[in-house]
Image (cartoon, rainbow, N blue to C red):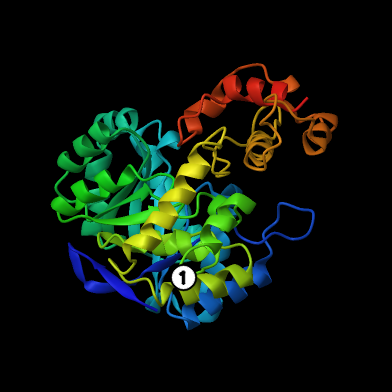
Amino acid sequence: MLYRRFPRIPEKEISVLGFGMMRLPLKKDTNEIDYEQTKAMVKNAFDNGINYFDTAYPYHGGKSEVVLGKAVKELGIRDKIYIADKMPLWDVKKQDDLQRIFDEQLKRLGTDYIDFYLLHAMNAERWQQVKDLQILSFIRQLKSSGKIKHIGFSFHDSPDAFKTIIDGFPMWEFCQVQYNYMDRDAADLIAYAAKNEIGSIVMEPLRGGLLAQPPKPVLDIFAAASKPRMPAEWGLRWVWENQNVVVALSGMSAPEQMVMNIATACAGHPNSLPNAQLDTVKKASEWFNSRVKVPCTGCNYCSPCPKKIAISDIFREWNRLSLNGHLEATGNAKSAAYSDILKSGRGVDQCVECRLCEGYCPQKIQIPDLLKVAHSAMQ
């Protein structure tokens, strides 16, 4: 395993690969986390040098924190790893909510401190909320008391909003942004953070798994390269090419994914890909970006929908049809998978356009509007 350091936290070595706990393995035909498999993956991660474990209050309906805490306790590794957790700002309506939520997180994790604590999904609107409710004062107090060790934020918004947030608080030690070979613009955010001696964590390095399982045209692009690699390896190596990226989080949901990503991480040096290989990745990026219909990563922050609409499943199927060329002639293609969703009562026909989902979407997708387009395309 390779390690990097945050500029403002030079005393800590962080594994370049972090275990994201948002897409944990599930028991068959359920939404229940498979604890034994998850524990085995946590152990495998630790045994192979991963020391950064990222969870959040809403992941898996609040169960991600619980499962991580239980596994860490049973494995006896709490003082050997770093746990990252996040304050869900959308659930903070008044100052009292801050302490209540934080105490609940400590209880779920079974710990008395959190190593890396983030304000979750920051944007311009939430930055104003942070100031109005004096949330930074609360965070400072947590650090002073030793309840958290390091302060950061995750981000989804414009470059101007990012700069305002970076400039607005002198105690930021790290930030977290979405960065992959499809979402290249975040390189400017990472560079601005680095200019301010703030290291970056990368989320969605494989775009919710999309880049790990590309369609045949992208596989052909990679196969023609001078150095053939598996798709996930191309994606991760491209992210680690950036020397200002400290750790890339991978939401690994199967042991074989972890084995492959750990092997890739051992070669994840910055500035190590020759220009010919960077050109290969650029070709793959251009192919994807010309065909993806909606930038949904399947994070499911929009769930549960009051009408139980399977938002991320619908968008995933729409993208699949487009990426596999089924929409090229007319823009429409009958989808058996979407027909099943409709029959189950979770289709777009149930949407009442309450738009609650839009407020939670970190990608700022106009969900009801695009659901209508997807519905028409797959009928």
Q: Is residue 216 above or below residue 77?
A: above
Task: Say which residue appears at 44% left-offset and 45% top-offset.
Answer: 182
Q: Is residue 54 visible?
A: no
Q: Residues within 10 Å of mark 1 (few under 14, many from 20)?
A: few
Tell me residue 183's x, y (percent): 40, 44
User: Which residue is at the front of the view, 78 or 122?
Assistant: 122
SS for callout 1: loop
Tell me residue 370's x, y (percent): 59, 24
Question: What's under tag 1, amino acid-wise?
Answer: Lys
Q: How many marks?
A: 1
Task: Say which residue appears at 21% left-offset and 58% top-offset.
Answer: 144
Task: Say which residue appears at 64% left-offset and 31% top-offset.
Answer: 305
Task: Say which residue appears at 66% left-offset and 35% top-offset.
Answer: 318
Q: Is residue 118 left or right of residue 251?
A: left
Tell me residue 23's x, y (percent): 58, 55
Q: Is residue 48 visible?
A: yes
The C terminus - image quarter: top right
Q: Is residue 294 above or below residue 154?
A: above
The N terminus - image quarter: bottom left
User: Which residue is at the front of the view, 217 or 74?
Assistant: 217
User: Which residue is at the front of the view, 186 or 102?
Assistant: 186
Q: Is residue 215 above or below residue 334?
A: below
- Residue that badge 1 annotates: 227
Tell me residue 260's x, y (percent): 55, 72
